[in-house]
Amino acid sequence: MIQVLKSWWPASVFLPGGHSWHRTLVFATNDDLRVYARRGEPYDWASPIDFETTVEPRQFRTHVGIDITTLAGLVVVTPTGGCGCGNPLKTWRPDWASNVAAWPAPSSKM
């Protein structure tokens, strides 16, 4: 079952390879990081999160990038603030998005 660990709306994302999107809906899930640039499934971009190198995002300030290491590379999610009025993503959520879980603790390496 897919579980939401964190979500950001509206947010800008800077993806590996230099591509960026603005006014996106982003979910950190137990399976991967998912970016929606438009309403509906499937998502527009996804990659598994490396939980060993990504600390739990605790920043709630707007315009401050959040680094998330994925198997595809570093993704920077920047919550942009505002209401996202006029964007169809504002009121849409995937069916699975109501399943919420805590950020996994990194495994201890000795």
Image (tube, rainbow, N blue to C red):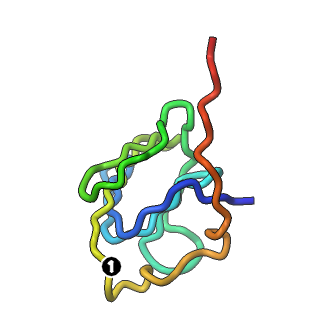
Give, as a three-letter code, the residue at label 1.
Gly
**Percent of width and height locating residue 39:** 49, 80
Query: In the picture, which quadrant includes the C terminus?
Result: top right
Q: Quadrant of residue 52?
A: top right
Indicate whether 68 appears above or below 43: above
**Residue 94 lies in what quarter of the image?**
bottom right
Outermost residue, right direction? 1
Which residue: 60% across, 59% down? 4
**Quick one: SS at disc 1?**
loop
Which is nearer the eye, 100 or 84? 100
> Crowding at label 1, few (<14), some or many (≥20) Cα neighbours within 10 Å?
some
Residue 93: quadrant of the picture:
bottom right
* Label tally: 1
Residue placed furthest toward the bottom: 86
User: Percent x, y for residue 8?
Assistant: 42, 63
* Quadrant into which the N terminus falls: bottom right
The residue identified by callout 1 is 84
Residue 36, position as x, y percentages in the image: 47, 69
Instruction: Establish if 61 lies above or below 108.
Output: below
Give the residue furthest to the left. Answer: 63
Q: State left or right for residue 26 relative to residue 79.
A: right
Q: At x 61% / y 35%, what residue is drawn?
A: 105
> Which residue corresponds to the image point at 28% horizontal and 68% vertical from the top-left?
81
Instruction: From the viewer's side, name the closer residue of 87 and 61.
Output: 61
Q: Looking at the picture, how far across and down is residue 27, in whole percent? A: 51, 60
**From the viewer's perspective, is residue 60 above or below residue 42?**
above
